[in-house]
């Protein structure tokens, strides 16, 4: 079984980014911890790294400032030696695409199979569109890519907990 914990305040910060970049995709890196016992994987998101000052955005693409994020991550890692880069989040809120693009899938497969990626999985959180009449301001989808696999799995909302976990102060 696959479960994910991501604190509601972290999601609210992502939603704020959507409103800051209404006409462009945006995103960041997901940091936290995980446990993998037999076939049970639990992902515990505790922090997010921003996109960075050299991030490039358009209505149909988003490229993070990897050098900036790497520098930030190394600082966080000194403070929290067990922290992991679990994956990335980004948005399609501005363009109507309600799933990962082909480019997203290619990038995430490349990431999970990189020798520089420490885990055998890569977690991708996608914000798809605004939902002003629902409990959440935006609709979210969660995906897991596994090392050496050609496909990905969408994680049902019933397996995502937004009420637990503490946020790390970075």
Image (cartoon, helix red, strand yellow):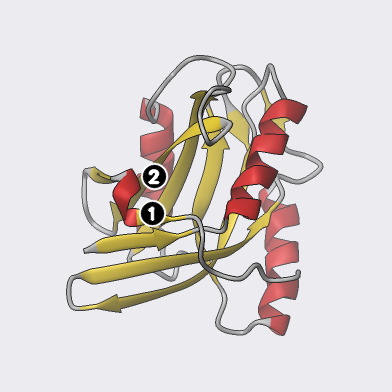
Residue 34, position in %: x, y? Answer: 42, 73
In the image, residue 134 lies at what x, y percent? Answer: 50, 28
Secondary structure under badge 2? strand
Q: Is residue 83 left or right of residue 67?
A: left
Residue 139, which numbered label? none
Q: Is residue 1 above or below residue 91?
A: below
Residue 64 visible within the image: no
Do tag 1 and tag 2 residues touch (Cβ < 8 Å)? yes
Q: Quadrant of the C terminus?
A: bottom right
- Nearer the observer: mark 1 or 2; the answer is 1
**Separation of marks 1 and 2 at Cα, in angstroms:** 9 Å
Q: Is residue 45 left or right of residue 41?
A: right
Q: Does 126 sit above or below residue 22?
A: below
Decide which of 26, 65 is in the foreground and name it.
26
Local packing at callout 2 (Cα closer than 10 Å; few below 14, some 14-19, many 20+) is: many
Please name the residue shown 18% across and 71% down the image: 39
Q: Which residue is mark 2?
A: 142
Across and down, in percent, residue 129 comes to 51, 23
Residue highlighted by disc 1:
160
């Amino acid at each position: 079984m696959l479960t994910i914990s991501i604190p509601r305040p972290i999601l609210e910060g992502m939603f704020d980014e959507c409103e800051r970049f209404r006409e462009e995709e945006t995103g960041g890196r997901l940091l936290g911890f995980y446990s993998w016992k037999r076939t049970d994987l639990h992902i515990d998101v505790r922090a997010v790294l921003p996109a960075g000052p050299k991030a490039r955005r358009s209505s149909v693409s988003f490229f993070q400032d990897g050098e900036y994020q790497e520098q930030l991550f190394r600082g966080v890692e000194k403070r929290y030696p067990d922290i992991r880069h679990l994956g990335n989040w980004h948005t399609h809120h501005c363009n109507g695409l309600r799933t990962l693009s082909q480019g997203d899938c290619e990038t995430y497969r490349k990431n999970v199979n990189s020798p520089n990626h420490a885990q055998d999985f890569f977690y991708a959180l996608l914000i798809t569109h605004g939902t002003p009449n629902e409990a959440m301001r935006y609709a979210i989808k969660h995906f897991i890519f596994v090392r050496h696999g050609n496909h990905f799995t969408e994680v049902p909302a019933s397996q995502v907990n937004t009420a637990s976990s503490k946020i790390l102060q970075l």
